[in-house]
C-alpha cells in the first residue's frame, strides 16, 4: 500500500494496514490490544519488533522447568524463571526478544543460557541455525523437542 493510501485510510477512520513481515504483523496486533493487556516487558518486546528489522532463524526447541532444580528456577540474570517469559539460548545476546512463530506464536526473552554443546548437538547436526530452550510449567513438554521458526530482535 502506498503512503498516500495509508494516509487516506487513516483519515477515513480505517486502521492502518498491517506490515507484510509476519513478526512485525504480530507486534502491531499486540500493541493495538488484539491479545489483551501486555506486561511492560511484552510492550517493550513487541515495540522492538514493530520498530526493528527482525532476523529469522530455524531453531531446535527444547523445554526446561522449575522441576529441574536451581537452573530451572533462577535465570542467568538472577531473576526467577518465568514460563511466560524466560528463554535460554547460547547464540543470542542476553535480553534479546524472540518470537516463536507457529500456530501459537509466543514472545519470549533470552534470560538464560544452556550447555555449550546444545547448539551443536541439537541444532547444527540437524541443519538448523540455533538451539533454544523454552521455560515451561508443563512437565509433559520436558521430553519434547523439535524444529521451529523464530524471529529475533536485539
Image: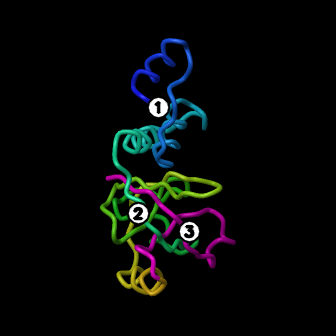
Q: x, y (%) of residue 124?
A: 41, 82
**Could you tell me which secondary element the residue under label 1 belongs to?**
loop
Span shown in magenta? 127-154
> Pointer 1: what residue?
1
> Pointer 2: what residue?
75
Q: Which residue is drawn at 49% across and 33% down?
A: 31
Earlier residue among tags 3 and 2: 3
Q: Marks 3/2: CA distance?
A: 11 Å
Q: x, y (%) of residue 67?
A: 58, 71
Earlier residue among tags 2 and 1: 1
Front residue (pair 60, 41): 60
Earlier residue among tags 1 and 3: 1
Front residue (pair 25, 33): 25
The crowding category of the residue bearing disc 3, from other C-alpha atoms within 10 Å (few below 14, some 14 to 19, many at least 20), is: many
> Pointer 3: what residue?
65
Q: Residue at x 42, y 60 (%)?
A: 56
Q: x, y (%) of residue 81?
A: 48, 59
Amino acid at each position: 500500500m502506498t503512503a498516500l493510501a495509508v494516509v487516506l485510510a487513516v483519515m477515513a477512520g480505517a486502521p492502518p494496514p498491517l506490515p507484510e513481515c509476519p513478526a512485525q504483523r504480530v507486534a502491531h496486533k499486540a500493541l493495538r490490544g488484539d491479545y489483551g493487556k501486555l506486561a511492560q516487558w511484552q510492550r517493550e518486546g513487541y515495540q522492538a519488533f514493530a520498530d526493528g528489522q527482525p532476523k529469522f532463524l530455524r531453531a531446535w526447541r527444547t523445554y526446561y522447568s522449575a522441576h529441574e532444580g536451581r537452573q530451572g528456577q533462577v535465570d542467568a540474570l538472577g531473576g526467577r524463571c518465568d514460563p511466560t517469559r524466560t528463554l535460554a539460548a547460547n547464540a543470542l545476546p542476553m535480553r534479546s526478544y524472540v518470537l516463536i512463530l507457529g500456530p501459537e506464536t509466543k514472545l519470549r526473552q533470552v534470560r538464560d543460557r544452556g550447555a555449550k554443546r546444545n547448539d551443536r548437538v541439537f541444532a547444527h547436526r540437524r541443519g538448523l541455525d540455533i538451539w533454544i530452550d523454552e521455560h515451561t510449567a508443563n512437565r509433559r513438554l520436558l521430553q519434547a523437542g523439535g524444529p521451529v521458526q523464530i524471529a529475533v530482535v536485539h
